Image (spheres, rainbow, N blue to C red):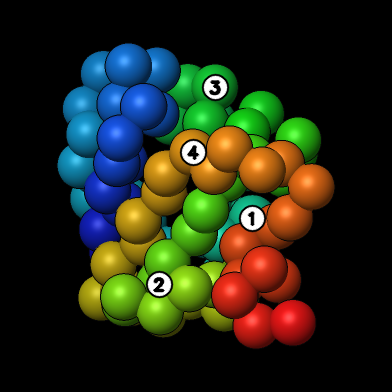
Amino acid sequence: MVTVMIIGQLQQHVDEPQLELELPSNPTVKGLLEANEDALGVVGSFAISGQLMVTVNKKISTLESTLKDGDVVKLTYQANFSYEGARWHNP
């Protein structure tokens, strides 16, 4: 299981701000979003447009970050959609 926490403005787009989800067959953040479109609502569309900030276990991450059982993924809206995940933190 992976804990997903929806933070900030994204909370208005989901029913539950914290979810326990099964680890997908493609164990990346992107795979998690794709496998759980119903539970995560439109959050995936923010990822496609580059407006999603991702952390995994308190470390800034990207959609391609690998997940393992027990990880905590936090998702929030990032205003500068020209960046994805860690790119603007770790050039």
List the residue tagged with mark 1: 30
Element on which disc 2 rests? strand
- Sequence-first tag of 4 and 2: 2
* Quadrant of residue 62 within the rendered picture: bottom right
Q: Which one is in front, 7 or 80?
A: 80
| Left or right placement of residue 5 versus residue 68 in this view | left
Q: Which mark is residue 56?
A: 2
- Sequence order check: which comes first, mark 3 or mark 2? 3
Q: Where is mark 3, residue-wise? A: 42
Most foreground residue, 25 or 45: 45
Residue 57 disc label: none
Element at badge 3?
Answer: loop
Specify the quadrant of the image occupied by residue 46. Answer: top right
Distance from disc 1 to disc 2, alpha carbons, whole Å, reads 12 Å
Q: Amino acid at mark 2?
A: Val
The mark nearer the N terminus, 4 or 1, is 1
Task: Determine which residue is flagged by label 4.
Answer: 77
* CA separation in Å, label 4 and label 2: 15 Å
Q: Earlier in the sequence, mark 1 or mark 3?
A: 1
Please tell me whether mark 1 sits on a helix, a strand or a loop. Answer: helix
Point out the tag, 1 or 2, that comes first from the N-terminus: 1
